[in-house]
Structures are given as C-alpha cells and as structure tokens.
Image (cartoon, rainbow, N blue to C red):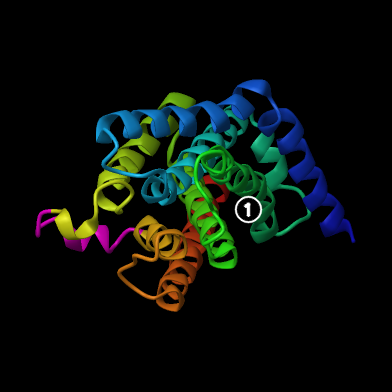
C-alpha cells in the first residue's frame, strides 16, 4: 500500500507541476497542427491527410514525451529534489515507472490531437483503432524511456534538449515518418531498422493506411524488446551514475 501511495504521489506531483501547464498543453496542439499545414502546403495536394496522419501521430508522441521527461528529470536533478526520491523507501523500478508514466500519458494525448483535426476533413471509419492505440502506447513508452535515458546523461536542461534533438531529428527522416524507408539510401536503411520508432510508425501505417512493411505482431514484438532493453538501461544508468 505504501508503494502505491508513493507511486501515485510522484505521478500526481509531476502532472500538476509540469504536464498541466498551459505551454505544455499548447505544445501538444500547435506543434502537430503546424506540421500538418506545412506538409499539406509542401505536397500541393499530392499527399492526403490520411497518408500524413501516421507520421504526425508518431512525431507528436516522440517530441511530447522526450521533451517533457528530459526537462523535468534534469530540472529535478539540478535542484536536488530527485535525490530525495532516490532515498525514498521504494524500489528504483517503481520510481522509474512513476516518473515516465506522466510523460507516457502526455504523449498519448498528443498523438490524438492530429486525429481530432483530421476528423474534420476525412472519414476515419476505416482505421483499426485497437492496433492504433497499441502502437501509440508502445511509441509513448519507448520515447519516454529514451527521454529518461537522455536525462540521466545530462546535467543541465539545455544539455538534455540538445541530446534529445540529436536523436529526434534523425528519426524524422530515418523511421518512415514522412519519407518511406524504401526510398532511403541503401546505407541508411540498416540504421532505420535499429530504431524503435520505425516499427511503431509501421504499425500506424498498417492500421491507418493499410501499407506496412511488417505485420503488426512482428512490429509489436520488436517494440516490446526495445521497451525491455531501454527500461533496464535506464535502471542501470540511474544506479551507476546517480546512486553509486
């Protein structure tokens, strides 16, 4: 019971202090909307909203989760408030899950902002919503863990943001968000298949447009492997860099 109380208090504090602030809420609306408008103008009608939707959803999750988590963890570490959590009578695994859950929920909400806008222009009845939700959740989890992994390696907020951009922007072009993987140079394709967002985007493409490289079960399995790997990497880095 004490673990659940501690878990809930950590999550509630993060949501109230970070995720419910007006700038963060507007970030989840303005950023996907601006990218949608930019892509539609650039394509000059050659690309429909349905083709853009998987990339916009994946990008909204990626930027929302990594930005928030990298900033909050780094800020708390600098102010020594995170140190008090490390000595609390809860396991490191519970602490990690409590800290990333707020970012995961924020990323999931961000993902459906483009869907709400798209619903005004196109018919979304053909989308497999079950697979879409599973993809969004997995992308949010892997992105949150990536943000935490970055935050562990940074000492200041600007460092965390810089490290985040080092990973995020290459993903925009290598994970099939807006450029199909089969159109990438041969030398870049192996890199693309080493990134978890590639498989999350592929799930969304299959669920929304019906065009995917792999089947959903394979993609979900790979995403679960990435989730497990990133989770244990985060635990190891926290224990070695912040505790020992």
Q: Residue at x 10, y 54 (%)?
A: 185
Q: x%, y% of residue 73?
A: 58, 37
Residue stretch in magenta: 185-195
Residue placed most toward the observer, 226 or 124: 124
**Residue 187 belongs to magenta span:** yes
Residue 124 appears anywhere in the view? yes
Please give the count of numbered marks on the rendered protein. Answer: 1
Q: Is residue 156 visible?
A: no
Secondary structure, magenta segment, majority class: loop
Return the residue found at the far right: 1
| Residue 156 position in % (x across, y down) | 47, 27
In this picture, is 74 found above or below 86?
A: above
Disc 1 target residue: 96
**Residue 220 horizontal side relative to residue 120, left or right:** left
Answer with the quarter of the image where residue 94 lies: bottom right
Position in image of residue 101 (x %, y %): 66, 50
Whether 11 is drawn above or below 214: the answer is: above
Rendering quarter of residue 78: top right
Look at 54% across and 67% down and name the residue there. 131
Residue found at x 54% / y 58%: 235
């Amino acid at each position: 019971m004490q673990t659940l109380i501690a878990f809930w208090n950590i999550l509630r504090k993060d949501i109230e202090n970070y995720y419910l602030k007006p700038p963060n809420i507007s970030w989840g609306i303005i950023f996907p909307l601006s990218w949608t408008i930019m892509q539609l103008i650039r394509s000059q009608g050659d690309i429909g909203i349905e083709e853009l939707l998987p990339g916009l959803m994946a990008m909204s999750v990626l930027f929302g989760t990594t930005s928030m988590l990298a900033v909050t963890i780094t800020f708390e570490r600098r102010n020594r408030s995170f140190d008090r959590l490390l000595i609390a009578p809860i396991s490191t695994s519970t602490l990690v899950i409590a800290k990333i859950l707020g970012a995961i929920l924020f990323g999931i909400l961000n993902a459906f902002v483009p869907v709400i806008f798209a619903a005004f222009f196109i018919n979304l009845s053909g989308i497999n919503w079950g697979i879409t939700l599973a993809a969004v959740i997995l992308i949010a989890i892997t992105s949150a863990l990536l943000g935490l992994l970055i935050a562990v390696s940074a000492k200041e907020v600007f460092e965390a943001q810089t490290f985040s951009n080092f990973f995020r922007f290459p993903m925009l072009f290598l994970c099939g968000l807006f450029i199909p993987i089969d159109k990438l140079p041969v030398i870049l394709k192996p890199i693309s298949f080493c990134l978890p967002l590639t498989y999350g985007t592929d799930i969304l493409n299959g669920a929304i447009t019906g065009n995917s490289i792999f089947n959903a079960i394979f993609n979900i399995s790979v995403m679960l492997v990435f989730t497990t790997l990133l989770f244990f990497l985060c635990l190891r880095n926290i224990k070695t860099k912040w505790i020992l």
